[in-house]
Amino acid sequence: MSDPRLDRLTAQLTDTSRMFGPRRRRRAAEELSTLGTAAAAAALAEALVRSSDPVVTEIARGALEGVEEQDAIDAVADVLMSTGDELLARLLARAGRAPSDPGRHAVVLFLAGEFDRYADLDFDGSLLRGVHAGAGAALRRRLAEKARAGGRLEWVRAVADGAVRQAGRVSDIEWDAVVQTLTGAQRWDELWRLALDAPVPRAAAVIRAVGDGHWPLADVDPTGYQELVRLARRACAAELPGTTPFGERQAQVIPSYADVQSLTVTRDGAHVISGSSRGDALRWQAPSGALEGILGLGSKRVLTMATTPDGELLITGDLGGGIKVWNLRSRSVIGEYTHTMAKRNVVLGRNLLAVALSPDADLLASSGYGPNVQLWRVSSGRLTRTTTLRADELWVPCLAVTPDGTMLISGGQKGNLRLWQLPDGAPIRALEGHTDHVGSLAVTPDGSLLATGGYDRTVRLWHLPSGEPAGVLTGHTQLIRALAMTPDGKLLASAGQDSVVRLWHLPSGEPAGELRGHRGTVEALAVSPDGSLLASGSSDGRMLWWTRRLSQLDALVRTPLGEVDPARIRRFKGSYNQFTAAERAWFDLVAALVRWRHRHDVELLDASYGDQAAAHDVELSDDDGTSQGPGRTPHRPRRKRKGKR
């Protein structure tokens, strides 16, 4: 059960009002510091990490330094695990405050730079390895940065989990830290074996660097090795196989007979559904663009919509706060509900309602012109109100649910951006950055990155679940109304009042192009499930459908080499003559690396010990820099091998 007093104080800690905000924040911090409870300690830890008010952070620091109760220490450690904040780690380590969980204690010591104490606690790296396996993106990133700076090989063990097959599971930041750490320790053999199980773009960069640096590799066939280096250099000089960019082909213009307010693509990619100011929902065939049918007519703008994962239901929201549940097969309304709206304001007469479905379609969130977000339970097409969240003083024009269904994001006026826990709706934190209304949201498919579009003409990126800022994207000349991401999470589209659809690479935020053709405000964006179609809808009464060609090798080059079966390579042989020169360069390298791996399975096995369940383990020797080498393996049970070696 929530504590009203604690909820009030926690909310005041993030009060951003100019007149009374500073005083409320400081009073709340002072009052929380006197409570001495675990929940108060957690709130103060969040304030220490996120508050930009120096008085609040100083109050929080002083209170946390005096924390002695174990449950309060564990509450602070919880915040550390979600944020990876080094300041919290140093505070706990210097005060001698140890979380009750040994794995979390190991993280505290590691992030605080207390490596001797860490080594005494976690001599075999098992504690850090266990924490890393379940850690969020923010903590993993901070561990990588700390390991890179300190050259910590025990972290490499944790990242690889003792096995090179994990090379495809780590982020780009972690991979770069692994490579730099092994390079600095001159662990060429370990680095080579790690690369042979990574996705080929990572493997190619390492192989080329090994060849360019003439690094000594023990027990490696020089002829085959030189051929791999040659193929890696050729591949690195070619464009990575992927898809053609949106905009390479002329956009398909779809007249929609009225301004387009909302868009969605069905889960099978066969239809695009649009909502308009006439109150109707139109279903269009993809990719032909033929109008297939009208899903009823209404009297209010259809401002937002979402389809269930099974493709059976469509949920729409309109200007007046009406929520309709449609059966897409019968094209009939099977339920009508109302989200209580405030009195219409002529300034905020559009984009007043948002709906967002959880991935399993068991929960729906709705919001509009008014302070509340309403949570609904969804069962057999019926909606039942469960929880009401107070998210803003004026309006909440956009919502999003993370792919794992554990978090709701809401955007509101004057930069009000909040994270909520699901399914109970408990507040998590507020994110500060936008200087005007937040009008659109999008989350990457892996849930690690949030994109927000603002009326301040910026797109902002945030790490999830920590909420740390990850970048600010500029280029739009007017307010932003819509965001959409490709299914691989590599490309973000943004659009708004300047009529331009801008594309951005993720997670870097680098510009990836512009799509022009609309003559009015772009109100909605949607991407097909396979990523081949980007649809944009505008107040000019048209949709533009942008398509791109998907490379046959796109999935192959992103798969860890340890998971590529030789039979999969053989299936591409019939298409080889249809490949571009760049695709051939990368395919030749993948094929050669897969052949190399399967010809040298025995050698890779002989390099392993420890986790007997791992097929290809990398053993890192002691920190003195001496490598055990593939020719000197420890005693282990012999395994029978069938077939020719």
Image: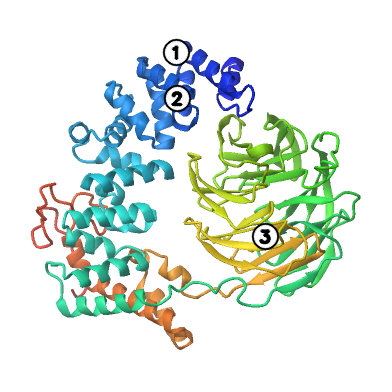
- Based on the displayed image, in which of its 4 quarters is residue 23 positioned? top right
Mark 1 or 2, closer to the camera: 2
Give coordinates of residue 283: x percent, y percent. 79, 63
Dot placed on the residue nearer the N-terminal end, 3 or 1: 1
Q: Is residue 150 above or below residue 560?
A: above
Residue 600, visible in the rendered structure: no
What amino acid type should be assigned to the residue bearing mark 1? Gly
Residue that label 2 marks: 57
Q: Quadrant of the N terminus?
A: top right
- Which numbered tag is attached to residue 526? 3
246 and 308: which is toward the camera: 246
Residue that appears at 26% across and 49% down: 156
> Disc 2 on helix, strand or loop?
helix
> Disc 3 on helix, strand or loop?
strand
User: Crowding near pointer 3: few (<14 within 10 Å), some, many (20+)?
Assistant: many
> Disc 1 on helix, strand or loop?
loop
Give coordinates of residue 382: x percent, y percent. 76, 41
Give coordinates of residue 183: x percent, y percent. 21, 58
Residue that label 1 marks: 36
168 and 412: which is toward the camera: 412
- Left or right: where 173 falls relative to 605: right
What amino acid type should be assigned to the residue bearing mark 3? Ala
What amino acid type should be assigned to the residue bearing mark 2? Thr
> What colouring does the structure picture have?
rainbow
Residue that appears at 82% across and 33% down: 342
- Based on the displayed image, in which of its 4 quarters is residue 344 positioned? top right
Dot placed on the residue nearer the N-terminal end, 3 or 2: 2
* Number of numbered discs visible in the structure rendering: 3
Q: Is residue 434 above or below residue 2?
A: below
Q: Are marks 3 and 2 in contact (CB under 8 Å)?
A: no
